[in-house]
Image (cartoon, rainbow, N blue to C red):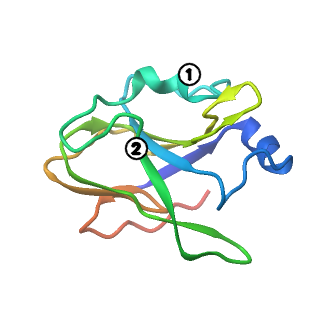
Amino acid sequence: MASVSYWQTHYWRLIATGKVRLGVDPFKIALLTSAYARNAAHAQWSDISGFEVAAGNGYTAGGQSLVLAVNGITDDAIIYIDPVWTALTKTFRWAAVVCDINVDALVKPLIGIVLDVYKRQFRACARSWAKSRRCLRPSRRTCPPRLKA
């Protein structure tokens, strides 16, 4: 299944000013229901937290921490280990990336949103699910090729 990423406009300002540091600051990825409607004005976790899937059945409220891979900082990339939700049984459509610190007036700034391009809901049924660089997928399958713009 293919996915598309939307990066919030303020994210670039936070990076350029050094207020959010990739590879240094803690990040989380949280799963959101299909009730969420993407809005470029959403700037922090409180703007979207009401759409998070409920805790339980393999999911913890607030999402999962992204862990920097060994040698994850290179000249052209910062690589995080794919998070895995073991035995997840939830329906979700979005994955939100949040910086897990407070920056200026923002409490846990929203960095970006990942959406299935076919606008289907994902249904995870008692297996491990992983967020890869290309898609949300069952961890035992391979991802499809990246779609070209």
Res 118 label? 2
* Left or right position of 60 against 105: left
Question: What SS does tag 1 mark?
Answer: helix
Visible residue check, residue 48: yes
Q: Position of residue 149 (x, y in %)?
A: 62, 56
Local secondary structure at mark 2: loop
Q: Residue visible at 33% across and 39% down?
A: 120
Q: Quadrant of residue 91?
A: top left
Residue 1 visible in image: no
| View extreme (left): residue | 126
Tell me the CA gap for discs 1 and 2.
Answer: 24 Å
Residue at 64% across / 52% down in the picture?
Answer: 25
What x and y, as percent, mark residue 68?
Answer: 54, 65
Mark with earlier residue (1, 2): 1
Image quarter in which the N terminus is found? bottom left
Three-letter code, disc 1? Asp
Instruction: Say which residue appears at 27% left-offset and 32% top-offset.
Output: 55
Question: Residue 23: which quarter of the image?
Answer: bottom right
